[in-house]
Each structure stands twice: as C-alpha cells, then as structure tokens.
Image (tube, rainbow, N blue to C red):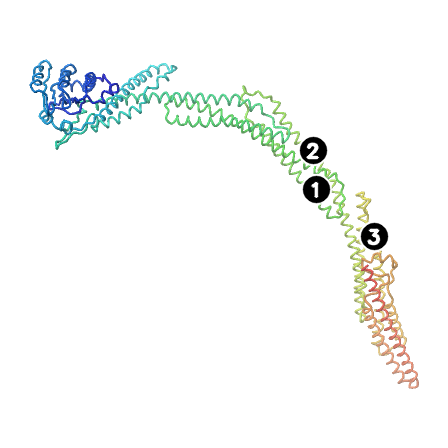
Amino acid sequence: MSGVTMEASSLLPILKKKLAFLSGGKDRRSGLILTIPLNSDQTSMEELSATLDYLLSIPSDKCKARGFTVIVDGRRSQWNIVKTVVLMLQNVIPAEVSLVCVVKPDEFWDKKVTHFCFWKEKDRLGFEVILVSANKLTRYIEPCQLTDDFGGSLDYDHSDWLNKRLVFEKFTKESTSLLDELTIINDSDKSASVDKDKSTDGALLPSFDPETVLQTGHELLSELQQRRFNGSEGGGGGQAAPAWCPMEEELLAQPQVMKLLDSLREQYTKYQELCRQRSKRAQLDEIHAKVMQVVNWLQGPGSELLKTQQTIGDSMRAAQALQQKHEEIESQHSEWFAVYVELNQQIAALLSAGEEEEVAELKALQQQLSDVCYQQASQLETRQNVLQAAHAFHSTTQELSQQLDGLLGMLCADVSPADGASIQQNLKLLEEKLQTVEAGLSSLRQKGTLVLEQMCGQSPWPLEEAESPPGEQQDNVQHVQAVMEEMELRKQRCEDMVDVRRLKMLQMVQLFKCEEDALQAVEWLGELLDALLKTHVRLGDDSQETRTMLDKHKKFVDVAQSTYDYGRQLLQATVVLCQSLRCTTRSSGDTLPRLNRVWKQFTVSADERQQRLELALNFHTMAEKVLQQERVEVESLDEVDSSGRTLLDRLALPLIFPDGCDRYRANAAFGHFRSEQFFGSPSDTAATAEGVRERLLLIEERRLQLQEARLLRDEEDEEEVVNGLEGRLDVIGEELSEKEEQDEEEKEAEHREEDLERATQDC
C-alpha cells in the first residue's frame, strides 16, 4: 500500500470546488474513472493540478497500473481550456491515463481543428483522446459506472465523499501516530522493567485517546463495509450492480482501516496491560505509604497520647474529665481506624486478583496493619474500661459517703418522738438507712475490685515503649484501697452508733408500750367498775340464784384484781425504763393515782356488792326454810322479817367513795361517777326491792296463817290477834306508801342530777 502523501484537510477549499473527482466507477478494463467537470468560470490550472495530484495519490500502484479513464466534461467550457486540461494530463498522469473522453457540447467546436489537434498530439500525449457526446459515452463505459450527469445510475455525493475522506485521513493520521507512540511506550516498558526504580510515568500518556480513535475507526469501517465511502451501491437504469465492492479492491480504504485497527488494538491491549501493571504498582506503593502512615501514627503520637493518660482520678468529677479526654483521644484514633478499614478493603480487593508476589506483599502489609491497629484498639478499650470502672467506683463512693453522712446526722439528732408509732417509724427508717449503707458498701467493694482487676489486666506496653513510671499505677491501686478502707471504717463507726441507738429506741418503744398498756389497764378497770355499778344490780330470786351470782361476783373481782396488778407492774416497768434512759422529763404521771383511785372505788363497790349478795343469800335461805316448814316459830319469822328489812335498808343506801366529791369528779372521764353512787338505775333498785318485799309478804302471809291457827286454838284471843294483825297490815301499808313516796322523790332527784350533768357537759 502506498502511503498518503497529501492530506485533504490542507486542500479542503480546493477540494470543495469539485474540480475533479473519483466517482468510484470503472471502465470495461476495471480502470478507475476520473471525472473533470469543467464549467464556464475560469478554471485555475494550479488548483486542478493539485486536485489531480491528491486524487491520484489515493489508489494503489496496482490500481494505477490498470490505467485511468478520464472524462473531461467540456459541455460548459471553452475548447482552449479543454485542450489545456488534456495536455496537463500528460504532465500529471501520463503513464496512468489510458483513455480520455472529452464530452463535447451540442454546439461543438470546429471538428477539424479539434480532431486534428488531438490526432496530431496522440503519440506525444501517450493516451487516446476521444471526443464524444454525453449520450454516446455509454459506448465506452457502462451506464452503471457513470454518474447521473452523463445519464448513468451511479450515485455520487461529493460533499459526503469529502467528509468521509477527511474522517479517513484523520483516522489514518491519528491511528498511525498513536500506533507509533504505543509501540514506543510498550517497548520502553520492557527496558524499564529491568530497572524498577526508573520512573516512566511521563511516557504513559499518548497524544490521542485510544478509545476515541478506535471508536472512530470502527465507525469508519462500518461505513466502508456499507459501501458509502467514495461511492455507494451501484445499480441503476434496470442494470444490476457488480458483485464486488469498488472500495475494497481499488481504493483499499477498508483493508487499510482494518489493518490499522488490528495493529492499534494489539498495541492498545499491550498498553492497557502496561497501564494496569503500573497502576497496580502505583496502587501498591500508595497502599504501602498509607499503611506506613497509619502504623507510624498509631505507634508514635497515638501511643504517646495513651501513655500520658494513666491516672484514674480521685473523684467522680476527675474521672469524668479523664473520660472526656479519652473520648478526644478515641476521636483522633477513629479517623485513623477509618483509614485502616478503607485500606483493609482495598487490600482484600487486590488480594482476590493479585499475583503471587503481590499477594505475599499485600498479606504482609495487611498483617502488619492489623496487628498495630488491633493492639492500639485493645489499649483504647482497656483504658476505656478502666475509666468506666473508675467512674462507677467514684460515683458509688460519693453516693455511699452521702448515705453515711445522712445516717450519721440521723444518729446525732436527739430522739424525742411523741409516741411509740413514731419511734417504730424512726427505727424502721434507721434500719433502712443502715441496709442502704451496707448495700452501698457491698457495691463499692465490687466496683473497687473491678477497678483493680481492670488496672492489673491492662495490656502491657512493649519494653521500648513503656516509659510511664510504675509508681503511677501503684498510686492508683493504693488510692482505691485507701478509699475502700476509709468507707469500711466509717460504716463500722455508724454501725456501732446504730446498735446503741437501736437499743435506746427499743427501750423507748417498750416505755411507750408500758405507758399505753397501763392506761389501758386503768380504762379496763374503769369499765369493770362501770359494769359493776350499772349491770350488777339483781340479787337473785332464790338462794340458789343468789349463790350463783355470788360465785360470779368473786370471779369478777378476781379479774379486776388481775387487771390492777397488771397495771401496777407496767407502771413499775416504766419507772425502771425511765431510769435506764435517763429520761427525767417522762414518768408515769397521774396514771398511778388514777389506777389506785379506780381500784379503791372498785373495791368499795365490790365489797358492797358482796355484802348485799350475802345478805340476800341469808334472807332467801331463811325465808325458804320458813316457808317450807309446816310448823314455824314466830321467832324464826321475826328473824326473816328482820333480815329482809335490813336488806331493803341496805338497798336504799348509796355508795360513799373515800376520795371525796371534788377529787373524784376530776377523774369522771373514767366512768362518769359521782361521789354518791347507786347500783344501777332507781327502777333497777326498785325492782330488786320489790322482789324482797314480795318475799316479805309471803312471810307475813305465813305469819297470818300461824296466827289463824292460833286463833282457832285460842278463840278468846281472836279479836286481839285480828286487831294486831290489822294494825300490822296498816303499818306495812303505811310503810309501803312511804316507800313509794321516797322512790318518787329519788326519781325526781335523779332527774335533776341528770339535768345538772348535761348542763355541765354542755358547758
């Protein structure tokens, strides 16, 4: 293939004028057809010569050897111009021209002149010149090889051809230059591979983009394969186009493009591999530099930052400040750890596609980086754990100290509760505080042990890096142990004080309990007295019932005696407890006098009740005996009558307490008694007295019966006996009337006293 000596871009203005063109058509000898369309304008021979030179540089020598058929279209030109052009062909392409067809106009020049001139110059020109009209041109050339200007069917677009030619030449120029550059670069890499230290990065950039040039070539090849370059598919006027493509054989554009593309792809593939290898080498170098940068920082400034932070602080605030400082250090490390993660991912990606030598180098870098990062991360985590444990320890210490202060303040305060419930509540609160302190101390021990374990379990620095003084760690251990011992001593002192306070408070609880129980004993004794005076009124209707009531009374008195003794014992216990507590402000107060006063009242009332029951028992026993005997002595009846009247007189008498009216009313709340008191209400007393009187009436009836019997025996004394009996009945009737009047007066007096008491209570 002959090289292209001229470029269309340099002749673009001339080529656009279409002074001559290769349409792609061929003559019957397969020679190329060169068309020179002359026009009426003055044609520049220099431009035409340049155009012909360019067009004749396109075909190969093989194509040129077949000869050209030149069509000189002189239909719109003058004869002298046509002649000049024909003569110029001798100088431009004398050997390649085999036939020149001069297309004459309808009004042609002088035939003799023209024929003579061409015939005379035939030997000198070296080619045959034929004058032919346009419609006779098909005698020499097939219509399918002629353009439509000459009545043929061959399509030709000069602008399209020129554009494609520019693309072809640009591709040829760029691909050839790029091919040379890639060859130089690839060849230089072989020599550079011997000296690995020599940098050839500057020669890795060609003048043109290989991808763009290849894409242009493929597009151009596609156009050529479609026969759109320098001509299109033939066929016109009903004639079939030839089976072969003119561009493939004659212009050789497609083989040339294919060859350039193949060579370019081959060199570009080598170039890509070269770039890939160099890129991988550069990437390895970059990764190595970044790895060493991370390693150097972690082993240098990073380690120095951690080694300067070894204390745990002496308070919660100091521990918080150390944690904040550690967070800043972690923040600085996190940036380098992020770089480590990124580098690890890059190394993993390279390991999957790397060569054996590269894999070994990458694994060594990855292992070195991982070892350093893991060691530094372990140091950071250990330091963080120590600081967290120290913060928890100081926090627990502060909380426990506050708890001990609160407990000590409670123990130092005076105990002056108002009642036993308050003491119980204070005692419960004291126990809860002590339990809280014990729980806090147990938590402190655990957290102190954890701190010591964390500090002792720290990963040691390498010997060449261990520059922190060993005394700093020992000071931390001694500080933790000293705090724990101090809290133990404070807790023990508070616990001893709690034992003393607990004993005192328990004694006070017992004191209040004794006082409350003593008051309860007074109330119970008062209730027993109240029950004795208000409900123990009946004396029984016969001797058996009275005897039963007497036995119950004795048991009732025994209960009261036990209550009184219990109250006395409680009051004696309060005296002992007050002496033990040195509580001079508290004593039994008026509880003991009140207890004694109620007991005296009860004993007076109980004795009176017992005497009345004994009188009633004696009365019922004698009355039953008299009423059951058939023969009764008058003296026996008199004794029964005397006993009944004595009982009635006793029932009418009030109870007189030895305390006096004024002193007893001061304690009227415990029973609401007066200095003169009766058993039950007046109606109850009247009902009891009525039962006695009924018995006395039975005795009187018995007496009447005896007197009647005596009257029967002694009729003489009948009137006297009757009169005596009537007199006695009158006396009994008067007594009954007087008794009823007395009862009414007592009722009125009782009503007045009740009104007085209500008025007093209202006041």
Amino acid type assigned to the residue bearing label 3 in the image: Leu
Q: Is residue 263 above or below residue 676?
A: above
Of the numbered discs in the image, which one, if any, rests on residue 489? 2
The image quadrant of residue 261 is top left
Q: Which residue is mark 1?
A: 430
- Residue 685 image point, x, y percent: 82, 69
Direction from residue 463 to residue 230 in the image, left or right: left
Where residue 316 sits, quadrant-wise, is top right
Residue in front for this viewpoint, 535 or 253: 253
Q: Secondary structure at mark 2?
A: helix
Which type of secondary structure does the marked residue at label 1 adopt?
A: helix
Please tell me which of labels 1 and 3 falls first in the chain: 1
Gap in angstroms between the C-alphas marked 1 and 3: 34 Å
Residue 1 visible, this angle: no
- What SS does tag 3 mark? helix
**Closest to the observer: 726 or 219?**
219
Residue behind mark 3: 592
Looking at marks 3 and 2 on the same chain, the residue that comes earlier in the sequence is marked by 2
Closer to us: 624 or 173: 173
